[in-house]
């Protein structure tokens, strides 16, 4: 008898569900669509950072020549002669190839003076031509700057250090960033009395430039021809870093 009652109860429940759905269909006047709600996922999101310090193997040196004259043409001609002498020294004496010498700035502009009586007047012209030299023998950078100064360079702005083959360090910083993310996520899971599950999503901080090179402080190389000692340039280190956004499952 008890078994029959249970079966009847099941039939009644099932019938109620069918009638309920039918009622929804009739009230809307069309086919009813039933959607299952997606279960919320338990996840934890962390940012992993990786960084390594590397001895640089390449330098980018900004060297310029500036000339003054009464006319724009005279200033430009004087500057062109200085630049030719500088290029001859770089290419012939220091054996720097054409692809490692790039013009970065060139301009000829007037110099102005101002008095209350005469107002603003042009007093001569300045011509400037700056180049960027790529150089790999870092131990000789000071000697190169001295030679450039003697050849007529009078505007040496800065020296930037970097590494030429950046890709070889990308794997290292990514591995360090992932290890850092694992450490953070594990600590969070432990504090929440949970277990860390699989990695669901990984994205790098900047897909266009995943490795960020922290430049050394700008080096102001003031080279003087009458200084007996050679210019000393310290290379220091460059830092290679990246960040990973990682999402883990929490169990």
Image (cartoon, rainbow, N blue to C red):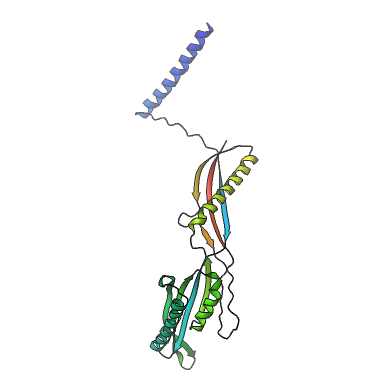
At which x and y percent is residue 205?
50, 53
Of residue 229 and residue 80, the one placed in the foreground of this image is: 229
Give me the residue at 51% from left, 10% from top: 5
Q: Quarter-wise, where is residue 71 in the image?
A: bottom left
The single residue placed furthest to the top in the displayed view is: 1
Q: Is residue 25 left or right of residue 239?
A: left
At which x and y percent is residue 115?
49, 91
Quadrant location, the C terminus: top right
Of residue 47 and residue 98, the one placed in the foreground of this image is: 98
Q: Please determine whether, in this image, residue 187 is positioned above or below residue 39.
A: below
Total marks placed: 0
Give me the residue at 55% from left, 57% from top: 241
Give me the residue at 57% from left, 56% from top: 51
The single residue placed furthest to the bottom in the displayed view is: 117
Give me the residue at 59% from left, 44% from top: 185
Q: Please determine whether, in this image, residue 158 is positioned above or below residue 125.
A: above
At which x and y percent is residue 249?
54, 39
Of residue 244 and residue 14, the one placed in the foreground of this image is: 244
At which x and y percent is residue 191?
65, 41
């Amino acid at each position: 008898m008890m078994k029959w009652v249970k079966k009847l109860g099941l039939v009644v429940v099932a019938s109620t569900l069918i009638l309920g759905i039918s009622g929804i269909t009739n009230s809307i006047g069309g086919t009813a669509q039933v959607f299952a709600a997606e279960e919320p996922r338990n996840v934890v999101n962390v940012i992993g950072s990786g960084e390594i310090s590397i001895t640089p193997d390449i330098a980018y040196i900004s060297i310029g020549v500036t000339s003054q004259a009464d006319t724009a043409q005279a200033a430009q001609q004087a500057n062109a002669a200085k630049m030719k002498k500088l290029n001859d020294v770089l290419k012939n004496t220091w054996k720097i190839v054409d692809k490692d010498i790039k013009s970065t700035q060139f301009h000829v502009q007037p110099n102005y003076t101002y008095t209350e009586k005469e107002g603003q007047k042009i007093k001569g012209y300045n011509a400037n031509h700056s180049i960027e030299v790529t150089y790999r023998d870092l131990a000789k950078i000071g000697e190169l700057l001295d030679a450039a100064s003697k050849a007529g360079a009078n505007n040496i702005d800065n020296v930037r250090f970097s590494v030429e083959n950046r890709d070889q360090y990308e794997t290292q910083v990514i591995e360090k960033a992932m290890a850092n993310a694992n450490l953070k996520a594990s600590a969070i899971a432990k504090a929440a009395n949970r277990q860390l599950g699989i990695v669901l999503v990984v994205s790098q901080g900047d897909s266009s430039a995943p490795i960020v090179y922290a430049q050394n402080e700008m080096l102001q190389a003031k080279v003087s021809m009458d200084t007996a000692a050679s210019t000393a340039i310290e290379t220091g280190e460059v830092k290679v870093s990246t960040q990973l956004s990682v999402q883990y499952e929490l169990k």
